[in-house]
Amino acid sequence: MFKKEKVKDLHYSVSGVITADELQAAADEILTEYGKNAKMPGFRPGHIPLSVLRQKFNASAYGEAIDKLMNRDLTEFTAAKKIRLAGAPKADLAGWEIGKDAEYSLEFDILPTLPEIDLEKFTLTKKVTTVDESEVEKSLENIRKNRSIAEKQDEKYAAADGDVAVIDFKGFVGDDAFEGGAAKKHHLILGSGAFIPGFEDQIIGHKAGDKFDVNVKFPAEYHAENLAGKDARFEIVLHEVRKHILPELNDELAKAVGQESLDGLRDHIRKILADQYAEVATQEMRTELLDILADKVKLDLPETLVEQELNMAKAEHDRHHAHCGEKCEDHKWDDKKERKEAERRVKLGLILAEWGTANKVEVTRDDLQQAVWAEASRYPDPKQVFEFYNQNQNALSMLRGMLFERKALDAMLTHVKTKEKSVKPEELFKQK
């Protein structure tokens, strides 16, 4: 057991002694276990004399023995004190030699004890809204547009906003054509903003068979530096114009998208919108509760965890800064500000972890699978996401941790008081 201990807040400094005899006995156990499968010339596996094993592997066995015995002492100490480590301890064995007693010291931080949190004292604002029927009609119109058919129009038809123009184009700066500025039979949706400002507007009103020029100015921030801010002329050949023909808004359209009737489709859209509104309102409540917890709960923080969080933030900042270069000059590292943010994240993480554990919050296998599926659905090739999590247990553990915190936070929300506030749907989506 430790012979000395020094405690300051959440930081412990302890020291102990492992006798030479105890170390050799532990090392011999490790050597004996290793000798069961070791292969050495002149000896059968499992029959290598301990003296021979000592000659070859004594140093590494001693290293394992010291770790094992220090961990034993530390485990007994933390169990007796009913404390938990906030991170791996730092060990010091300065001056120790094989054959002598090992005097060592350990330094480590422990996790704080979470104070009692009376969530019923907190009152959160719960924003409530009703589904705007105009939003339902917009959704129906989007469904019609997504299932529209672009039909070729005759030569008398003038291209309009939203039509598809099939064009040849060739771009010039002055008299010189520039690289990447030409294409044949390109399908351009007018009004989509796919091309630089002014380009699509000058095609509107033209008819199939027309040949004409489009004059534009490249934006000052254009990605190609040789074109940024320059005037350009494009020679255009308009081959054909295709107009989007929308399907009728009826039961047939509803059946085509998986609903039994148009009324059923409207109800389905209302439910989707209502769920979206509810999720946004809940997210605002989560944010409000986190702000309250960060402000109201008093908790000492292990410096080990704060430093880890700060180092990760600094590494991420440096990676981002290296990628965007001079454009990031306005986002310089502010150590005081970043430390405060790191302390907030550590504090909230500890609160959610401790409260969640005490209140038996669990992340089930289904929770984890659904989260991976949700992540995979955002990518063109979901299989890559599944393979990533199957092969990267650290990433899976981080995902599990985020899910645990979210479930703990949502469980907390069931204990707080709420006051409802009626708002219009657009107020829920305003940028903060």
Image (spheres, grey):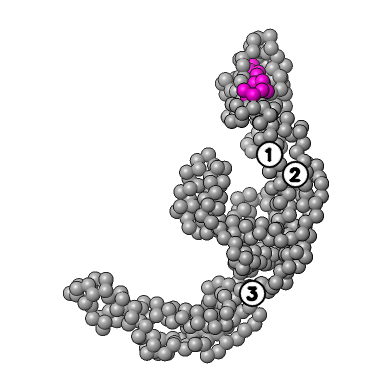
Q: Which mark is residue 112?
A: 3
* Residue with the mark numbered 1: 271
The image shows residue 424 at horizontal and vertical percentages of 80, 42
Q: Is residue 241 magenta?
A: yes
Which residue is depicted at the point 77% across and 65% down?
Answer: 121
Q: Is residue 2 above or below residue 123?
A: below
The image shows residue 232 at horizontal and vertical percentages of 68, 27
Q: Does any portion of residue 195 appear in the rendered image?
A: no
User: Residue 141 falls in which quadrant of the image?
Assistant: top right
Measured Cα–Cα span from mark 1 to mark 3: 44 Å
SS for callout 3: loop
Q: Is residue 206 left or right of residue 62?
A: right
Q: Tag 1: residue type?
A: Lys
Which span is picked out in magenta? 240-253
Q: Is residue 213 above or below residue 52?
A: above
* Residue with the mark numbered 2: 429
- Of the pair 311 and 296, the residue shown nearer to us: 296
Q: Is residue 102 above or below residue 285?
A: below
- Closer to the chain start, of discs 1 and 2, is 1
Neighbor class of circle 3 (other Cα within 10 Å; few <14, some 14-19, many 20+) is: some
- Closer to the chain start, of discs 1 and 3, is 3
The image shows residue 166 at horizontal and vertical percentages of 61, 19
- Closer to the chain start, of discs 2 and 3, is 3
